[in-house]
Amino acid sequence: MNQQRMLSLPKSSLDEKIIDVIAASSGLTAKQIHFRLQRELGLNQTYQATHKKLKQLAEGKVLVKTGNTYSISEEWAEKARKNVEMLSEKVSGRLKEINLDELAEGESKNLVFDGILDVGWFLADKVISYENPEKTAGLALWRFCYSIVGLDEKHYAKLKEGFSKNEWHAMVEEDNKVDHMFADTLKEYGIKEVKFGVKCATKLSDKMIIGPYIVEIVYPGWFRKGWELQNRLPRKLVQFAIGKHIQVMRDPKVKIQVIVTRNKLMAEEYRKEYI
C-alpha cells in the first residue's frame, strides 16, 4: 500500500484504526486486534473483514506478521514520519516546491524565503543534493563561509548526503579566523575544497552552481552587514560567541530572495574560471 495514501486516510478509516490499535500494544493476533476494534473503538464489523484488512496491510508492508501476531513495520513508520514532516513544511510554506529539472534552458525562477534556515534547507535539499547526471562539480561563490552551527539534524544528514553525491568546491571572498572555522566544519561533512580571499561574490549576493543551474542568493543590506560584523570582529576564535551568532543569523525573519536560472553554458564558464 502506498505510504502517502496511508497518511491521507481519514481517522474513521479501518486502516487508521488498526494502526492505532497495534501502535498502542504491538504484537497482537488478528483476534486480539478484532476484539479491541470492537471494544475500544466501537467498530462493528465481521472478523473476516478485519482479517482481510490485516492481510492487505501486511502485503503492503505497512504491518509485519511474525507467527500469528502483527506489528507495525519500522521501515513504513520511518517513511510515514518523514512524509508527515514534509507535509508540515509544505503547510507552513517552508518547503519550496521547485523541481530544478523542470526549468527550461534559459528560464529563471524567483523564490522568497523567510529566514536563513529556510534558505539553508532549500540549498541542502535541492541544490547541494541535486541528482547530477553529468557529475559536474558543484561550485559555491560566497562572500563569507556559510555556517552550519545550530542547524536541525535533517540539515546535517542532507549535507552529508549531498556532499557524498557531488564534489563541491567553495570560493570565499573573506579570509578570517571565523570563516576558516566554518570551513573546517564543512570539510568534516564532506565538502572537497574551500579557498579564501577569492574575489567571487557581490556585496549583497552569493551564487551556487550545480549541473546547468546557477542559484543566486540575495540578502538585504542590513542582514549582510550583521553577517559581516559576526565574522570579522573576533580577533581570536575564543572571542566568537556562538550564542550571539545563532541569535543574529537564525532569529530574524528576514526575506531572502533566491533566483534559480538554468544556463548550461554560463554554469560551465563559472566552473572553468574558479575550479
Image (cartoon, helix red, strand yellow):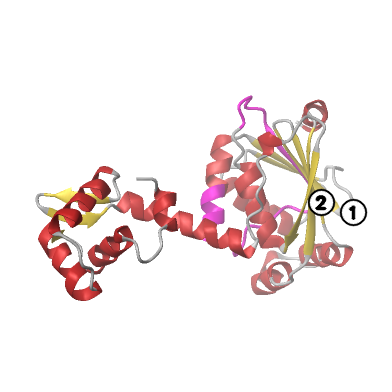
Q: Between 238 and 166, which is closer to the camera in this rendering?
A: 166
**265 displayed left or right of 165:** right
Give yes or no for contact between labels 2 and 1 (Cβ–Cβ under 8 Å): yes
Residue 205 placement (x, y as % from top left): 84, 51
Residue 272 placement (x, y as % from top left): 79, 26
Vertical order, 269 against 193 (above or below): above
Q: Amino acid at mark 2?
A: Arg
Identity of the residue drawn at 72% across and 64% down: 115
Quickly name the residue at label 1: 203
Q: Between 104 and 82, which is closer to the camera in this rendering?
A: 104
Quickly name the residue at label 2: 143
Q: Does the magenta segment cover residue 236? A: no
What is the quadrant of the C terminus in the image?
Answer: top right
Segment colored magenta: 132-158
- The local crowd at label 2, few if under 14, some if 14 to 19, many if 20 or more residues have their Cα within 10 Å, is many
Q: Alpha-carbon distance for marks 2 and 1?
A: 8 Å
